Amino acid sequence: MARGIGALGPITGPPNSPTPSSGSALSSALSGVEAYDNLVTDTNERLGQYQILRQSDDTITVLQAALGNLPKVGRTRLMTEISFLKEDKDIKQLRDHFVDAVLKPMKAAGASTPAVTASPSESGTAGVEVQKGLIPPASRSEQSKMKTDCLSRDDHRCVITKSVDMKWKRAHRDLYPQGTVVDDTECAHILPHALGSFDLDKAQEVENAAIIWAALYRYFPALDGQIAPDTINNDANGITLSVNLHKYFGQFNLYFERMEQPNTYRLVWQENFPISSSAPKVITFTATDPSVLLPNPDFLQVHGVIARILRVSGIDRKIDDMIEKSKMDDWRIRPDGGTDVI
């Protein structure tokens, strides 16, 4: 059964709704306080004019959650798109695009991933076309190397509990005193491994990968030049975690909030798990093996932003329900992507 981008279905084409090309409006909004404030006003007015289609229409909730949490450049780009879209159907499609191209692939990465909706903006579509020619997938050998490298960097321990990896301890009993706390650990991808999993010989998968990565670069520009599908197994995109903590992190129930000190983060729990009260409040990443890159703060920021948007918008519950439904259906997502579910 295909996983990750390999499980995607067909995608919806963008409507003919022009948004500013060349980034002139974006540059103006970023360079001046007045222009930015005007853009905020225009965006709020446009969202206020939106006519809800039905009771379950969460378009405004999702877009406001995104606007409240995206980094400034990504937020400004989204506001620019919203303020220039005149038709409500295009605003709805922008919501679908953000959910399908950003939230669903991140949240549902461990299961089958639903179809992706194209951006309703011309600038977003142009970004997709650029990405089509630039996205070779990741290799399995790199994933194995990443796990080994991160385990070495993290002193063969979970970075939160400091429990020693059980397999490593068994193979190196002479290095640890009796009674050393051990646990099963895994290399947790910060940006999910599934984002680099697709078949270059299948045009639909390449199309969907292009849409996803164009959206990630658009709303999280710090990622551009630092990570791509073929570098998803970069050591800086990995953290050694115990199996349970990996699950919480992958489900966006745990994220790391950057603090002023270098490589130092506050742990943020979105649920009251048994371990959340005993875990450290703050951790600092260090490298036992200095040749291995530390977790990238930009990747961790994206993970945290996605976690907050998922929770504030309520999309996390809908995606969880979708995943459970897909499990009962032999891990398959309907060909149309099930957009009526989310």
Image (cartoon, rainbow, N blue to C red):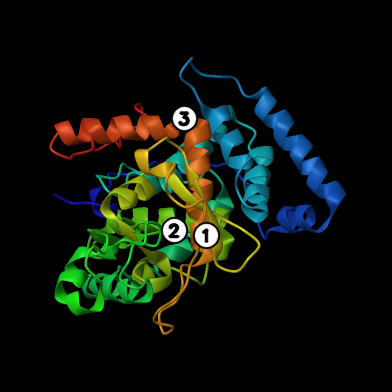
The Cα atoms of the two marked residues, 1 and 3, are separated by: 24 Å
- Residue 153 lies, in percent from the top left, at 37, 75
Left or right relative to 33: residue 50: left
Label 2, label 1: how far apart the Cα atoms are: 6 Å
Q: Residues within 10 Å of mark 3 (few under 14, many from 20)?
A: some
The vertical placement of 269 against 267, above or below, is above
Q: Nearer the viewer, mark 2 or mark 3?
A: 3
According to the picture, the residue beneath numbered tag 1 turns out to be: 217
- Res. 274 visible in picture: yes
Give the farthest residue toward the top.
55
Image coords of residue 169 (percent x, y): 20, 70
Rendering coords of residue 58 (x, y %): 51, 26
Compared with 19, 299 (above or below) is: below
User: Seen from this angle, which residue lies furthest bottom?
Assistant: 291
Figure check: 129 above or below 315: below
Residue labelled with disc 2: 213
Identify which amino acid the numbered label 3 is placed on: Gly
Amino acid carrying label 1: it is Tyr
Check disc 3 and report the residue beneath it.
Answer: 314
